[in-house]
Image: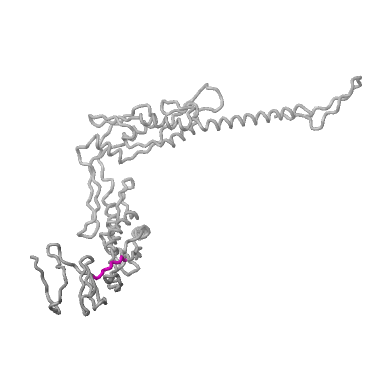
């Protein structure tokens, strides 16, 4: 911009006109200042307008943005998402193998369209200027953002085009109970689908969802996805952990040491075909369920009831069996996490298992009546299955018994003791 020089004020000339008032303080004294102010205001206004247009266009697709042959210019985020879903459902791929042809949708082939990512890409696309006319208008095609589930693609292909040749087989790792170790059955080579043409057709359908893409499926020689050596290495790593000492104890002193079969049941061998390896996985959720199955017989108990006696009129005769509390395994979540960590590290561990104890119930046996004699006598209660040894009206001892079965019942009544023996093998009247 050229530099403006101040214009000198004209000199006063003699005149008969009245004098004009002096120029107010602060008023622009030249046109250059007015021009500068006007240019600054114009620049600010254009900048504000451009910013407003940019903000408005960021919420809608720019003119010329296309999904294949569909112009989505001017659509907002919600409209773009609806368009993506509609076009994705309509997109098709024709797959041909030998003399058979099948038309498949994207979902059939294991394709998932990322609607949000596709919409964001459409909103970011800028095929033309934000300000200006339509002359020379350009377009930009935005392809769908997709992922392919190879397992679903393989399953769909195998169901529609079954092979009449041997497919490659991966090695098999299994736990041998007799050997107490993981063993490997080698894999072998064979024939497999060449999915490259199908994947190319999927990419074509994603780039132009309004058309039907085509792919010719073929077979090719292929080895197993997991080599034998990878399976052998995984089995060896798993076998090293079978020899670990994983001991589980309780505060009461009971203990259980995991067997090789226990550890094998907690071991998951996961094939990673992409990386051509087999990984060891120790999942705490799986381990927690397995722990409960093996520890319950060792630590849990139903408990035995506390037993006491009383006279027929309700006088307490005392306790003759204190009983035992019941024990149940508590929450094994943290225990399983610890076991999983130690198995991953290949480290021995001793873990205290949480137990929940329950107080024993009380069973009271009442005498059938007053003491029949002053000396020693025996009361047998078939309801509570208890025999009480009495000395007059004092309880000496009590026992839990097993009375006769329904077909050979214990006789009811009051009987006198007619013989005593120190030891004798006794038998009943039933055949066995």
Q: Is residue 345 visible?
A: no
Residue closer to the observer: 81 or 129: 81
Q: Residue at x 44, y 29 (%)?
A: 141
Q: Is residue 264 visible?
A: yes
**Quadrant of the rendered structure where residue 89 is?**
top left
Location of residue 413 with respect to 226 vertically, above or below: below
Whole-percent x, y for residue 299 in the image: 29, 64
Residue at x-position 42% and y-position 29% = 67
Give 233 or 295, whichever is nearer the viewer.
295
Quadrant assignment for the N terminus: top right
Label count reads 0
Residue extending furthest toward the left = 431
- Front in this rendered view, residue 326 or 155: 326
* Magenta region, main secondary structure: strand
x and y percent of residue 267 in the render?
30, 55
Residue 366 highlighted magenta (yes or no): yes
Most foreground residue, 195 or 150: 150
Q: From the image, which quarter does the C terminus lie in?
A: bottom left
Residue 15: name its quadrant: top right
Q: Position of residue 216 (x, y in %)?
A: 28, 31
Describe the colour scheme in one phrase. Answer: one colour
306 part of magenta stretch: no
Magenta residue span: 360-367
Q: Is 57 placed above or below 334 here?
A: above
State which quadrant residue 420 falls in. Answer: bottom left
Q: Is residue 378 left or right of residue 210?
A: left
Residue 425's x, y, as percent? 11, 74
């Amino acid at each position: 911009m050229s530099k403006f020089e101040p214009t000198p004020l004209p000199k006063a000339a003699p005149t008969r006109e009245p004098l004009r008032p002096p120029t107010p303080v602060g008023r622009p004294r030249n046109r250059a200042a007015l021009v500068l102010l006007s240019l600054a205001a114009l620049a600010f206004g254009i900048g504000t307008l451009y910013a407003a247009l940019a903000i408005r266009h960021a919420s809608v697709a720019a003119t010329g943005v296309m999904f294949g042959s569909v112009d989505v210019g001017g659509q907002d985020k919600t409209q773009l998402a609806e368009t993506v879903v509609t076009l994705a459902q309509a997109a098709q791929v024709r797959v041909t193998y030998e003399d058979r042809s099948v038309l498949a949708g994207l979902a059939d082939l294991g394709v998932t369209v990322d609607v949000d990512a596709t919409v964001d890409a459409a909103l970011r696309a800028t095929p033309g200027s934000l300000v200006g006319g339509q002359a020379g208008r350009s377009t930009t095609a935005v392809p769908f953002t997709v992922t392919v589930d190879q397992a679903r693609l393989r399953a769909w292909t195998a169901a529609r085009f079954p092979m009449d040749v041997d497919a490659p087989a991966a090695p098999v790792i299994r736990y041998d109970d007799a050997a107490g170790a993981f063993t490997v059955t080698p894999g072998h080579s064979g024939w497999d689908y060449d999915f490259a043409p199908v994947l190319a057709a999927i990419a074509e359908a994603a780039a132009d969802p309004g058309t039907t893409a085509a792919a010719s499926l073929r077979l090719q020689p292929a080895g197993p996805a997991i080599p034998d050596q990878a399976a052998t290495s995984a089995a060896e790593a798993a076998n090293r952990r079978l020899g670990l000492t994983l001991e589980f104890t309780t505060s009461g002193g009971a203990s259980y040491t995991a067997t090789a079969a226990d550890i094998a049941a907690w071991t998951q061998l996961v094939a990673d075909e992409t990386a051509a390896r087999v990984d060891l996985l120790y999942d705490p959720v799986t381990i927690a369920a397995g722990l409960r199955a093996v520890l319950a017989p060792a630590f849990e108990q139903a408990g035995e009831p506390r037993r006491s006696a009383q006279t027929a009129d309700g006088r307490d005769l005392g306790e003759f069996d204190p009983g035992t509390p019941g024990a149940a395994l508590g929450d094994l979540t943290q225990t399983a996490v610890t076991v999983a960590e130690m198995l991953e590290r290949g480290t021995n561990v001793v873990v205290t298992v949480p137990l929940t104890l329950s107080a024993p119930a009380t069973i009271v046996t009442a005498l059938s009546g007053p003491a029949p004699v002053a000396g020693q006598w025996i009361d047998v209660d078939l309801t509570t299955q208890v025999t009480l040894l009495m000395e007059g009206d004092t309880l000496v001892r009590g026992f839990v018994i097993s009375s006769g079965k329904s077909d050979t019942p214990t006789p009811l009544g009051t009987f006198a003791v007619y013989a005593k023996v120190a030891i004798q093998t006794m038998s009943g009247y039933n055949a066995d």
